[in-house]
Image (spheres, helix red, strand yellow):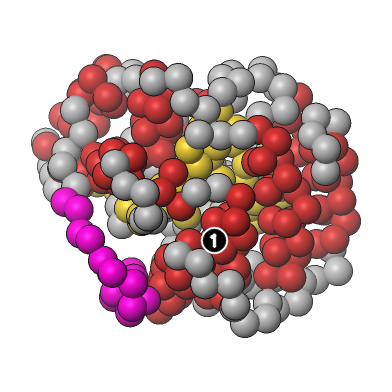
Amino acid sequence: MYRGISESGLGLIEVESPAIGRADLALVHDPGYIEAIEGFCLAGGGALDMDTVVSPESWPAALTAVGGVKTLMETLREMEDATGFALCRPPGHHALRARAMGFCLFNNVVVVAALLRAEGDRVAILDWDVHHGNGTQSLVAADPGILYVSIHQDHFYPFEGHPDDIETEAKGTTVNIPVPAGTGGDVYRRVWETLVLPVLTQFGPDWVLVSAGFDAHTEDPLADLDLLDADYGWMASRLARVHPPHRTVFALEGGYDLDGLRHSARSTVLGMAGEEHFGPPLSSVPGAAPAVEEAGEAIARHWAV
Ligand SMILES: [Zn+2]
């Protein structure tokens, strides 16, 4: 990913990721859980669940992943003409208040959202990782000042993220758009333009945090969607039209094809930096359009779309 971003040709400022402080983590995670993760990792590690295996090095890695997203936000806050990408692992969007899941220990993006909320800012989290961010949704669903939007593969891990979740707790601020296996960039671009960005602009966030997984890429070995590098750039460029890049924080989530990660990251930062022209998308299976229509009906109960 670092190579891909370097290859963009954009001026690059590297910012170190410091470890996040306990007090910041505790805004989102149960203090007993934080201690348990530390103890489990430092005692040698092992499997927290079927997918989530840790070692002693996982503890500092998890702290610097959250710290990196926070530092990126603080860095962008001082700048006028910049965009930023947090190259963090482990990812975060499956992490619950007191439970690790799906490679995730702490919810990197939600910790930063909580810091911004503490200052009164409104926050939108856009999650284009192929998996639904069940951890993120559960942590922010009750807060009307945080919008969560997820496009994800339906009937797929973690088997959550239904359009009707829009009716739970802070009504209207949980927006789920599940799409079937075989969905390509043609439908993603239409969803982005006709559902995601209209809801975003009506919500009017101060900050946009992007849970930027790249596992919806057609080359990704874990999932079955058909995005190309160009689709990520296209989505980033359309986001940049409606929200300032220096108030947008990209944080890595999943993505397991190394070339896909590299090229998609390059495309994403170019899109955020103002590049508008990206190649054409792949076409979707016929089932994609009705799925999007169903999600659109749920969204239309709360937003003008
Ligand atoms: Zn994922």
Q: Is residue 202 above or below residue 245?
A: above
What is the magenta segment's predominant secondary structure? loop
Q: Is residue 71 above or below residue 155?
A: above
The magenta-colored residue range is 1-16
Q: Is residue 242 left or right of residue 154?
A: left
Relative image position of residue 128 (x, y in whole percent): 56, 54
Q: Residue at x 78, y 53 (%)?
A: 194
Q: Residue at x 19, y 28 (%)?
A: 21
**Depth check: 299 or 305 in front?**
305
Q: Amino acid at mark 1?
A: Ala
Q: Is residue 143 above or below residue 181?
A: above
Q: Assess whether residue 9 is covered by the magenta stretch.
A: yes
Mark 1 sits near ligand 1, with its Cβ under 8 Å away: no
Relative image position of residue 16 (x, y in whole percent): 16, 51
Q: Quadrant of the N terminus?
A: bottom left
Q: Is residue 192 left or right of residue 10?
A: right
**Depth check: 276 or 115 in front?**
276
Q: Assess whether residue 199 is covered by the magenta stretch.
A: no
* Residue situated furthest front in the rendering: 80
**Depth check: 262 or 121 in front?**
121
Q: Residue at x 33, y 72 (%)?
A: 10
Residue at disc 1, secondary structure = helix
On the question of residue 28 being in view, the answer is no
Relative image position of residue 48 (x, y in whole percent): 33, 39
Q: Is residue 174 left or right of residue 37?
A: right
Q: Is residue 165 left or right of residue 3?
A: right
Give the residue pinned by disc 1. Answer: 236
Q: Is residue 224 above or below residue 239?
A: below
Q: Residue at x 50, y 34 (%)?
A: 206
**Depth check: 97 or 191 in front?**
191
Relative image position of residue 121 (x, y in whole percent): 47, 26
Q: Where on the picture, by quarter, is residue 171? A: top right
